[in-house]
Amino acid sequence: MSKVYVFLICMLPHVLEQIQASQIPGETKSSRKDRNLNLILRTMPRKSDMTGRKQQRSQKDVDVGGKKAVQEDEENPAPPKSKMGKAKLSRKGEEVEGSSIDQPATKTRRRNRSSGVEGSTSDKDKRASKSSSTRKKKQPLNSKAESEDEESGMQEEETQAAKREVGGVDPKKPWLTLAHKKPSPEWVIYDPDTMRRPALPSSVKSMKLLSWNVNGLCALMKKRNEFLVELVEEESFDVICMQETKLQEKEVERISTSLPPEYCHSFWNCSTAKLGYAGSALISKVKPILVRHGLGIPHHDQEGRLITAEFDKFYLVAGYVPNAGQKLENLEYRTGDWDSSVSQYLKELEKKKPVIYAGDLNCATDDIDISNPAGNRRNAGFTNEERESFKTNYLEKGFVDTFRQQHPKVVGYTFWSYRSGARSKNNGWRLDYFLASEGLMDQIHDSYMRPDVIGSDHCPIGLIVKV
């Protein structure tokens, strides 16, 4: 009814205009009323006409929709039906069971929903069945992923177990982590708690020597004021050699007075070419027979890198070998001049007594001595030139690497860079040594490391010699 009212309102101006145009002079009021009513009734649309137009529009929509559905069906043909009346739908390479209703019916349902007509209950059930079937088919994929994760976890656990078999992994003891990039199966990690040899009986006279690159003695004392006292209590050493003290002459007296009283013999060699740089020291309970600073060669002696102390049974040479430099700018000096000069000096001393050469010798001689050998072939301390020079001037001249002689397959480091938390990961280098004359090796009781001692980027190393 509302549509008729809307139509009358819209047509009213047009009807009034026709009524005025059709007025007849002298016509009575009643006859004019009847004529106007007939005019209005002729103007109104008939019900049969409205029904015909509606059916015509509906047929037109159906024709257009049918053409569209046929076109879509041609572009996306319905999948073949299986023997069980289920359609096989392909999705990302996997077969999933779906509804047996073919594609055109699906398109019809979509048009019904867009026209406000909902699908039947059976349609909903079929769609729910299709979704449930899809989920059932996907379940094996999730199970496969979980299986792969479990397998990966087992492999990681086996890897960690293998590491524990080699040396153990303990965040409180990072030096027990075998962090080498390509370890050999026979290598084991150095554990100072289990690999140090038992103490000699009190009846056997011996000397305990320590060596430590302190990387700035004043800085170390600020961080650990009682570091030397603590080290004395733990090790009760007789002599300690220090490298990279970075002291100036004016600081030596103040440092000397702060030493434990039993270490009354201290010797210092400070850099004169560059203040607060390099430097070495030798501190002893036992008074040496003779002490000498440097090599006696001026261009080698300006940075305070060498101290020689003569004892009854051997010479102790405390050395701090020059670094080849970040860009290897000192490589030629180190390998072609310094190493050969020191080697000649040690051989001269050896003519009188066996020699122990101790200190930061700034070279990892073999792959076992560095956690990442492949990545450091052209870095100072592991170049082929430095390694070859070390072997030629020391090992082939009769000086024995005491730690490697005692522990041929043991991975142990004495230096960890401050960069990238190298020490916590045990990404280290073995740069510190006790080299000894072959004639003294029968008297060497133990050669060891103290990776648990902190305060520097190096750790102390020790040597026990029977005298």
Image (cartoon, grey):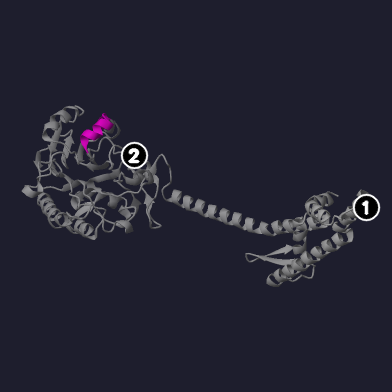
Which residue is rendered at x = 69% and y = 60% of the image? 137
- Observer able to see residue 452: yes
> Mark on residue 406?
none
**Which residue lies at the image location 23% right of the left edge and 49% below the top edge?**
442
Q: Is residue 297 visible?
A: no
* Left or right, 96 with reference to 174: right
Judging depth in this view, the residue of 395 and 364 nearest the camera is 364
- 92 shown above or below 351: below
Q: Name the amino acid type tagged 2.
A: Asp
Q: Is residue 85 left or right of residue 242?
A: right
**How many other residues sit within 10 Å of disc 2, few (<14), some (14-19) or many (≥20)?**
few
* Residue 351 lies within the magenta run: no
Q: Which residues are magenta?
A: 216-229
User: Mark 2 or 1 closer to N-term?
Assistant: 1
Corner quadrant of residue 205? top left
Q: CA distance from mark 2 to mark 1?
A: 126 Å
Relative to 202, does residue 29 appear above or below in the rendering?
below
Q: Are the residues tagged 2 and 1 within 8 Å (C-beta)? A: no
Query: Quick check: is 220 in the magenta stretch?
Result: yes
**Circle 2 residue:** 452
Q: Nearer the viewer, residue 389 or 66?
A: 66
Say left or right for 154 vs 333. right
Secondary structure under badge 2?
A: loop
Kind of residue at disc 1: Ser
The number of numbered discs placed on residues in the rendered structure image is 2
Which quadrant does the C terminus fall into?
A: top left
* Residue 454 x, y percent position in the rendering: 31, 37
Pointer 1: what residue?
A: 31
Q: What residue sits 29% from the left and 39% below the top? A: 200
Residue 432 is left or right of residue 185, and the answer is: left
> Regarding mark 1 in the picture, which secondary structure is present there?
helix
